[in-house]
Image (cartoon, helix red, strand yellow):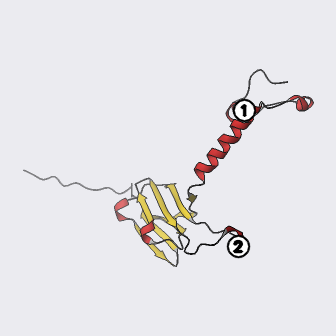
Amino acid sequence: MFKNKRSFFERITGSVSFDDKDFDEVQMPVEQETSNKDAASDWLKDNAEEGELAVDLFQTSSEIVIRAMISGVKPEDLNISITREMVTIKGRRDETERVAESDYFQKELYWGAFSRTLLLPSEVEPDECEATEKHGLLTLRLPKIDKQRVQKLKIKSL
């Protein structure tokens, strides 16, 4: 019925391998079944607190560009952190009008806290980055570090 040794995937997911002929014989223990459901619902609750911001990330010859739609977000509700290798954009979009759930026919817009952390494809100069917003489109321009550039150092005589 069960294999003597479970695969790595089976151990991680708690799944069970069986042959077609053993299909009717396999039963999941009740306590394990409920604990898996609780773990899944806990994971969903933890990840439902914050939405993920959709972005476009591309490069030109001299910079990396990130674009994101942030319509409805006040500038004071937006936080952008930049290091040489990573960018994090966090914010909050609040509804201005409260509508009862029963009055909605369709609800697709995301309201609440959101964030996105991006690992950059090359190092950037954080001090020279700029952010602009026009018509709800946030554009970050991150100048690449030129690793090919050679700086000559003059020696001072004391």
The disc at residue 66 is: none
- Residue 43 % position (x, y): 62, 46
User: Looking at the picture, how far across and down is residue 38, in whole percent?
Assistant: 67, 41
Q: Is residue 116 left or right of residue 79?
A: right
Question: Residue 129 falls in which quadrant of the image?
Answer: bottom left
- Residue 32 tag number: 1
Quadrant for the N terminus, please: top right
Which residue is tagged 2?
103
Q: Residue at x 48, y 70 (%)?
A: 139
Res. 90 in view: yes
Nearer to us in this view, 33 or 82: 33
Q: Find numbered disc 2 in the image and state the secondary structure of the residue it sits on.
A: helix
Q: Nearer the viewer, residue 87 or 27?
A: 27
Judge by depth and name the residue closer to the eye, 122 or 107. Answer: 107
- In the image, what residue occupies the spot 58% across and 66% down? 111
The type of residue carrying mark 1 is Gln
Residue 62 appears in view: no
